[in-house]
Amino acid sequence: MHPDIRKTFVATETTWVDGGRAAAEPLVMIAAAAVVKNPWAGEGFVEDLAPKIREMGPVLGELLTGMIIKEAGSGEKVQAFGKSAVVGLNGELEHASALIHTLHFGNHYRSAVEGKSYLAFNNTRGPAASPILLPMMGKNDEGSREHYLTFQFNISDAPFSDEIVVALGAALGGRPHHRIGNRYLDLKELGHDPKNPAAV
């Protein structure tokens, strides 16, 4: 284990009933997190974050991906994914962003689950026990609204003021009773190209 990682955390939530109706397939969401010392803590304003990004990104990506796959059972079972980071109050928001917005981190996960989409993300600053929000979307389809999900959790003693919580999220299905269609139907109704999901 990397010496700057204080602890790891895994949480699994299974939703059996939503809207008063049983789910045909329960929705399983997983969060895997690492509490890591902020590599830029106490150094003042650091102009070049790249060296520590390249050092820590692969370590965290490999570690958290392994935790997700172990809990899910296989990468194939993961249908939606996302990432998040919360930096402690003595850090910059840029520090939280630095450890997750890099291919040195995310590509481990994307490869393991054979995903093509970018990872939905959230990066914030806060004290210990801050809400950690893991937004997710379909691993191969950004327009699949049934996979627009958010897993919320917290770690009671993290982040310390000089730490960062880095997390990956997975969903093994979509919302149990999704019924709002998808982006492609909206694009068709509005006369936009379905191959351009951003409608720009």
Image (cartoon, rainbow, N blue to C red):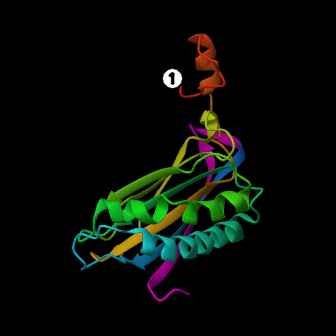
Quadrant for the N terminus in the image: bottom right
Helix, strand or loop at mark 1: loop
Please tell me which residue lies in front, 183 or 105: 105
> For this rendering, which residue is in front, 132 or 40?
40
Residue 191, percent across and down? 59, 10
In the shown orientation, is residue 154 left or right of residue 176?
Answer: left
Q: Which residue is drawn at 58% across and 18% down?
A: 186
Residue drawn 46% across and 82% down?
A: 5
Q: How crowded is mark 1: few (under 14 residues within 10 Å), some or many (20 or more)?
A: few
Q: Which region is colored magenta?
A: 1-23
Whole-percent x and y of residue 195? 66, 25
Residue 45, how many percent across, how many down? 23, 69
Residue 160 makes an appearance in the image: yes
4 shown above or below 137? below
**Amino acid at dot 1:** Val
When asked about the image quadrant of residue 143, the answer is top right
Q: In this view, does 128 lie above or below 3?
A: above
Question: Where residue 193 sits in the image (x, y, percent)?
Answer: 63, 18
Does residue 14 show up magenta in the picture? yes
Left/right of residue 46 with respect to residue 185 in the rendered view: left
Inspect this view and state whether residue 181 appears: no
Determine which quarter of the picture holds residue 176.
top right
Which quarter of the figure has residue 149? top right
Residue at 51% in and 23% down: 200
Residue identifier under label 1: 200
